[in-house]
Amino acid sequence: MRGDLVDRIMAIMEASFDPAYGEAWNRRQVEDALLLGNCHAYVVNPSGLPAKDDEPAAGFSLSRSGFEEEELLLFAVTPEYRGRGIGRSILDALYRAAESRGAKRLLLEMRRGNPAERLYRAFGFSTIGERKAYYRTPHGTRIDAITFAYQFEQDS
């Protein structure tokens, strides 16, 4: 595993995740996830293409594949690059990669009120569950979690 990949993910998370919600993972969590053979990181440049070592990183996804499912664990686009279609390009790449790994559906969970919900719904994700008061902010406020799924089209 390359340390620069983790460095890039950590920098994007730091710039993108509001600390009021405690959603960012720490470095050890990211490193441990990447040690597993079924976790996949994807980092993009400001054009939404895979970031090369000498290019700035504008966004990333971290997912975990399992039997016929892929779960989006972390997803972010840095604030200065939002609104340019980068999030959509990351989801498109995740879709293609998950499908190639045999996924029949994509899953994700987010806190209620996360602005990324609009992107997820536009992509085709739909709500399949809710966990009341699941997340706790550092200040003790409780926030519901919403589970979404994107079902791959089935061959007839």
Image (cartoon, rainbow, N blue to C red):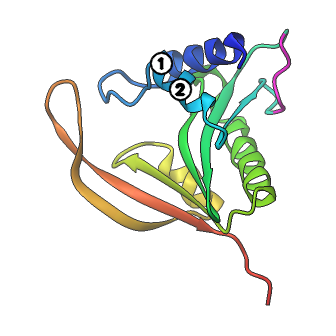
Please tell me whether residue 146 is drawn above or below residue 16 in the rendered image. below
Q: Position of residue 19 (x, y in %)?
A: 35, 21
> What residue span does the magenta drawing correspond to?
49-53
How many residues crowd mark 1 within 10 Å: few (<14), some (14–19), many (20+)? few
Left or right placement of residue 146 versus residue 82 in this view: left
Q: Which residue is mark 2?
A: 32
Give the residue at mark 1: 28
Hey, which quadrant is residue 154 in on the image?
bottom right
* Residue 143 image point, x, y percent: 23, 45
For the N terminus, the image quarter is top right
Q: Is residue 3 left or right of 23 when viewed as pictured?
A: right
Query: Circle 2 — which element?
Result: helix
* Mark 1 residue element: helix
Q: Residue at x 66, y 31 (%)?
A: 60
Q: Residue at point 13% right, 31% down?
A: 140
Q: Is residue 51 magenta?
A: yes
Percent across and percent down for residue 141 are 15, 35
Q: How many marks?
A: 2
Q: Residue at x 72, y 19 (%)?
A: 57
Depth check: give the residue in front, 79 or 145.
145
User: Is the C-beta separation of discs 2 and 1 under 8 Å?
Assistant: yes
- Left or right of 84? Residue 80 is left
- The front one of 34 and 52 is 34
| Rendering quarter of residue 85 | top right
- Mark 2 closeness class: few <14, some 14–19, many ≥20 residues within 10 Å: few
Q: Residue at x 47, y 25 (%)?
A: 29
